[in-house]
Image (spheres, helix red, strand yellow):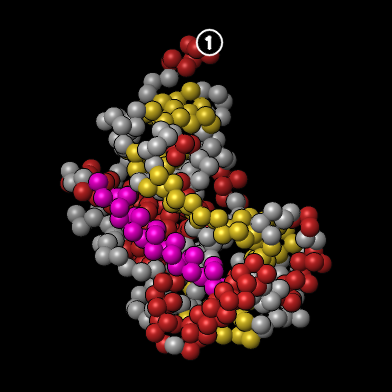
Amino acid sequence: MADSARELSESPESTTVVVIGAGPAGMTVANLLQQSGVDCVVLERRSREYVAQRQRAGIVETRAVRMFDSWGLADRVLGGVPHEGILELRVDGEPHLVSDYDGSEGPTARLCPQQMLVQKLTAEYLAKGGDLRFEAADVSLHDLTGEHPTVRYRTADGGLRTLTCAYVAGCDGDHGISRTSVPDGALTPYAFDHGIGWLTVLADAPSPAHPLLAVSPQGFAAHFPRGPYTSRYYLQCPPDDHPDAWPDDRVWDALRTRLGDPALVSGPITDREIFRLRSLVHDPMQYGRLFLVGDAAHIVSPMGGKGMNLALYDADLFARAVRDSVHDHDDTGLRTYSARCLRRVWSDQEFSHWMTGMLHDAGDATGSGPFRRGLARARLDRLFTAPGAARAFSELMTGLEFGESAGPPSRGQ
């Protein structure tokens, strides 16, 4: 059969929601819709093996754990170990333990890398009969402002498929097709470049007792657990630096100096890359029947661990809004989706910006200058000595409540 005839022979399929992207945002949306009895199809351009092994950092903060728990999913999709609620801030080698536990009852944060969360969400969705299509190429979105958007893509064998739906969830990240399908001028971008680079290193080396952030005159550094014998490290560097400029010996020497730990145990480095700290918000997070979820709508500096958690909150709000529309014919959640998400996004952007500035300005004063260095040191001292400041920090790290009623439908689904 000729290609044109083959393409014409493909009959359109229909579903309620097409989810673009099978990362944390997309697979959370898919699982919550599945829990709500709303049918969906997930399209992912990469293979399942690639997605499962894609290395990303992440602590699922307390409020996100409670969100999964309210849907009855926490025990099945959250691997990792409970986070004890202790964060170590080391200043010039002097340790300070700060609690990021807000004192409330219920499940607490989990040290759960993104790839583990995605693997478990994927397995849960497929085990319940979910429709997840990997290696979906040339995805394109059409008629987004009409009543029945269409999504076209090519299968791994080159066949053309068309899906019609009621809603599209754009969960394919900052460089995905979802946001670029929105006409110019429909969204307003708000961008900020922090002028800071991080070298991120994954190594087979012992993990720390607590997540560790360190300030020193040589620059910022961090050490996070990724398993009993695997660690993720971060080193402040020029944003235009190159990983090749950081051979193993230089990495370990810099970590021992900045962490104030001359006896730090090294290990084989399995991955290293440099990225620029930046922040970005798109407003609104919706165009017609396309709803942007997670990194497709906003990027946040990694300080404070808010990026993945914001994606989980977006997914929760979107899934509940679709659930209410489909089952109760109530479109309030869909109409207010963007405003409700952006309220939390801007709050977490502010916290991340504050924390980024404090921990970098307090160290190497080359860029910030001595005055800003003094201000940052004062903020750190207040955090260590003022109970009110420490309590506010704990609430922000945990994830502030914004009055949303999380959880599955009251109709018992």
Closest to the observer, 167 or 359: 359
Look at the image and tell me whether residue 93 can be seen. yes
Residue 165 location (% of width, % of height): 33, 33
For image coordinates 55% across by 24% down, the residue present is 158
Q: Is residue 198 above or below residue 413?
A: below
Residue 95 counted in the magenta span = no
SS at mark 1 in the image = loop
In depth, the one of 286 and 81 nearer the eye is 286
Query: Closer to the camera, 73 or 127?
Result: 73
| Residue interval drawn in magenta | 335-359
Percent x, y of residue 361 = 59, 72
Q: Nearer the viewer, residue 133 or 209?
A: 209
For the point 43% across and 55% down, which residue is it?
311
Which residue is found at the position 32% from the left and 68% from the top? 401
Query: Residue visible at 68% across and 69% down?
Result: 366
- Residue linked to disc 1: 1
Please give the count of numbered marks on the rendered protein.
1
- Does the rendering let one see residue 97? no
In this view, 413 is above or below 42: below
22 sits left or right of 366 in the view: left
- In the rendered structure, the answer to whether residue 365 lies left or right of residue 348 reads right
Majority secondary structure of magenta residues: helix
Going by the numbered disc 1, the residue's amino acid type is Met
Query: How many residues crowd around disc 1 within 10 Å: few (fewer than 14), some, or many (20 or more)?
Result: few
Residue 49: name its quadrant.
top right
Q: Magenta span has 345?
A: yes
What percent of the width, then of the height, locates residue 168?
36, 38
**Residue 181 picture quarter:** top left
Q: Is residue 306 above or below residue 147?
A: below
